[in-house]
Image (cartoon, helix red, strand yellow):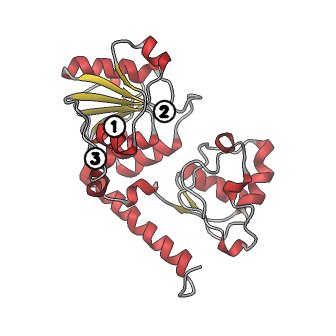
């Protein structure tokens, strides 16, 4: 089994075929779970390789809608749409790991890609709310450009979870920043663009699934406090996906009454 995250993104892996389980001789045993392409289309120069590699899987579980379309187009196969594995644990289970930060009353920035918008957005939100700003995944360049923002250069898993859980607001352009904001029911805002300024389909799919599209920001004009966030609906949708995932695993691992 391969997955999850962008294991099918040639740019992330330098097109390492290991992520496509090329070494597995018995293709009946080849599966993916919530595998992501991280793109809406496969470049023409890679199409034949992708078609050959994907066709060897007995079952494919994909994370985003665009990925499903890629699989269908290249192989003719249907695939399962599955949520990221972080959603296979409850908020209570994640909370047990979270380390509470010493800070209080703060806006958390968690960026995957450099973005002037989320820094400026957080500043505007700070003026509206009176909250200070803390930024994770901060580097020296960020500190030089934004001396007014407290930067945290690195964090453990437990610290990361704590920073998200105890934030008053979260501003992010990261899929997992978005995912844990949903899990912890945070007042969050997400810039749904990748570093090439193309739409981040992983984030778009998650917001669409959970009905939290209003949390998406494109300009500073989107900085408002009256954003509608129905986390009861979001939780319900996630629960449905959890059930589908459980059924997927039961089907692919137990089709003949036994596991592989």
Reading the image, the residue beneath label 3 is 184
Helix, strand or loop for disc 2? loop
Q: Earlier in the sequence, mark 3 or mark 1?
A: 3
Badges 3 and 1: C-beta atoms under 8 Å apart? no
Q: Residue at x 19, y 20 (%)?
A: 130
| Residue at the image position 33 percent from the left and 37 percent from the top | 214
Circle 2/circle 3 CB separation < 8 Å: no
Q: Is residue 240 above or below residue 191?
A: below
Q: Nearer the viewer, residue 161 or 206?
A: 161
Q: Are marks 1 and 2 in contact (CB under 8 Å)?
A: no
Position of residue 2 measured from the top left corner of the image (x, y, whole percent)? 60, 60
| SS under mark 3 | loop
Q: Quadrant of the N terminus?
A: bottom right
Could you say which disc has been placed on residue 214 in the image? Answer: 1
The quadrant of the image that shows the C terminus is bottom right
Q: Could you tell me residue 43's position as x and y percent?
A: 73, 41
Residue ID for mark 2: 112
Q: Secondary structure at mark 1?
A: helix
Could you classify mark 1 by the number of other residues whose Cα lies within 10 Å: few (under 14), some (14-19), or many (20 or more)? Answer: some
Q: Nearer the viewer, mark 1 or mark 2?
A: 2
Mark 1 / mark 2, whichever is N-terminal: 2
Total marks in image: 3
């Amino acid at each position: 089994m391969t997955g999850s995250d962008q294991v099918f993104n040639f740019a992330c892996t330098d097109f390492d075929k290991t992520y496509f389980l090329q070494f597995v001789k018995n293709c009946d045993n080849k599966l993916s779970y919530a595998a992501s392409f991280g793109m809406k289309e496969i470049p023409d120069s890679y199409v034949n390789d992708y078609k050959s590699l994907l066709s060897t899987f007995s079952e494919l579980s994909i994370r985003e809608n665009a990925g499903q379309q890629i699989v269908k187009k290249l192989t003719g196969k249907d695939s399962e749409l599955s949520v990221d594995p972080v959603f296979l644990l409850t908020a209570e289970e994640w909370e047990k790991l979270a380390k509470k930060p010493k800070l209080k009353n703060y806006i958390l920035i968690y960026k995957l890609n450099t973005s002037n918008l989320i820094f400026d957005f957080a500043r505007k939100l700070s003026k509206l709310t009176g909250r200070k700003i803390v930024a994770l995944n901060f580097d020296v360049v960020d500190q030089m450009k934004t001396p007014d923002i407290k930067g945290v250069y690195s964090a453990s898993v437990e610290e990361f979870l704590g920073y998200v859980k105890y934030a008053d607001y979260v501003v992010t352009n990261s899929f997992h920043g978005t995912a844990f904001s949903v899990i912890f029911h945070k007042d969050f805002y997400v810039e749904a663009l990748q570093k090439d300024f193309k739409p981040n389909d992983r984030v778009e799919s998650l917001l669409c699934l959970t009905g939290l599209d209003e949390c998406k920001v494109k300009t500073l004009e989107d900085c408002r406090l009256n954003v509608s966030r129905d986390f009861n609906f979001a939780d319900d949708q996630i629960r449905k996906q959890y059930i589908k995932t459980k059924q997927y695993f039961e089907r692919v691992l137990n089709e003949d009454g036994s596991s592989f």
